[in-house]
Image: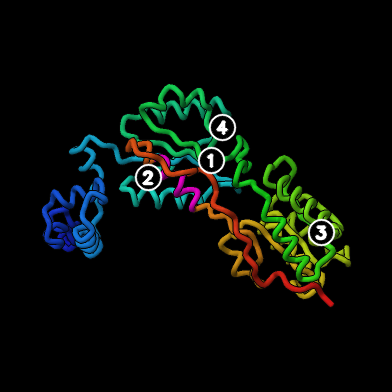
Amino acid sequence: MAQEAVGRDRPKAATIYDVAALAGVSHQTVSRYLKDKNALKPSTLERVEKALAELSYTPNLAARSLRSRELYRVVVVVPEASLYFPARMLNGAAAAAHAAGYRVDVVAMEGTEEARSRQLHTLLAGDDIAGILSFVPQPQAAAAGHASRVPLVVAGEYDNQMRALGSIADGTAAAGIVEHLASLGHRNFFHVAGPAGWPSAHNRRAVYEDTVRALGLNSLGITAGDWSAPSGYEAGLEVAAATDVTAVLAANDEMAIGVIRALHDRGISVPGHVSVFGWDDTPESKFHIPSLSTVHMDLEALGARSMAELTARIRGEQPPANPLALPPMKVIYRESTGPVRS
C-alpha cells in the first residue's frame, strides 16, 4: 500500500504537449526546437525555453529514438581507474552531451592494445550507439572498419600509458612563471620535475631550464618526483637543505603541496622564505593554506570540445574549429608566492 501511495503522489513528468500549452505554441514547434532550436524565431525560442525551464522538462530519449529512428546514446571510453583518470575532461564531455540531448554511458577500457582492439570491436558492433568518444588511445586498424557507421572521436592526446601529449603537455607556461618570480626579486630556483618519460614533465623542465638560463638566474637543483605529494615532500627536504633557494616550481599541484609541507616541517615559511608554484589548478589548490599559485588547464573545455566534435559527426554537421586542442593555459597567482625574502 505504501508503495502505491508513493506512486500516486509522484508528480507526472512534463510532456511536449505541456510545454507547448505553457509556451502558447504547437507541439510540432516544441518538437522542432528539440531537433534544432535555431530553426525557431527568437521570440518563439524564448517562450519555448522559458516553458521548458519552468516545467523542468527532460526529453524521453528512448521514445524519441523509437519515433525518429535516431540514436541518442553515446559511449565515453575512459582508462581503468587510476591516478591519471581524466575526470575533469569526462565531466566536460558529459555536460556537453546532455546539453545536446544525448544519454552518456561510461565504459572503462583496460589491457593491452590487442585487448582494447577486441573491446572496441564489441562496442562498435552495437546497434544502439550513436557515437563513441574515447579518452583512451585506440588502435586505428580496429576502428577503421566501422568508422563510417559509428562515429568515433579519440580525444585527450594520451599515449598508451595515459601520459599526456600535444597541447596538454605544453610547457610554455613555465616561462611566465619564472619571469614573474624573477620580477619579484627571486634569483635562486629549484625545480621538482615529473617522472622521466612523460612528455609533460620533459616540456616543463625544458622551458624552466631555458628561461632560467636566458634570464641569467640560478637553478640550484632539479629532482624528479612521481607526481605524488610524498615525492614532493622528499623534494621539499632537499629544498630545505639548500638554504639559498627562494623559489620552487613543481610540475604539478600534488608535488607542490608536498614541498610546502616539508618546508613547514623544517620551520621554513611559504611564501615568507620560499615561494612555491604548482601546475594543474586542481580543485583543492585554492583551499590550501597558503592557497597555491598554479597553472590552470581547462580540461572541462577540452572534454566539451571533444564531445562537440562527436555530436557534429553524428549529425553530419561541420565540426567546430580545432576541437581537440586544449584552450590556452593560464597562470594563477595565489598566496604561495611572493617577493624574495630580505
Residue at screen point 81% across, 67% down: 186
Residue at screen point 37% across, 40% down: 312
Query: Quarter-wise, where is residue 146 in the image?
Result: top left
Q: Amino acid at mark 4?
A: Gly
Q: Residues within 10 Å of mark 2 (few under 14, many from 20)?
A: some
Q: Is residue 151 visible?
A: yes
**Residue labelled with disc 1:** 79
**Mark before the other along the chain sequence, 3 or 1:** 1
Asked if residue 311 is among those painted magenta in the image, a careful observer would answer no
Distance from disc 2 to disc 3, alpha carbons, whole Å, reads 49 Å
Q: Amino acid at mark 2?
A: Val
Q: Which mark is residue 215?
A: 3
Q: Which mark is residue 104?
A: 2
**Mark before the other along the chain sequence, 1 or 2:** 1
Q: Which mark is residue 338?
A: none
**Residue labelled with disc 4:** 111
Residue at screen point 74% across, 59% down: 249
User: Where is 178 relative to 70, above or below?
Assistant: below
Q: Amino acid at mark 1?
A: Pro
Q: What x and y, as percent, mark residue 263? A: 78, 68
Q: Give the colour scheme shown.
A: rainbow
Q: Residues within 10 Å of mark 1 (few under 14, many from 20)?
A: many
Distance from disc 1 to disc 4, alpha carbons, whole Å, reads 9 Å
- Indicate which label's residue lies in the foreground, 3 or 1: 3
Q: Nearer the viewer, residue 323 or 338?
A: 323
Residue at screen point 48% across, 24% down: 142
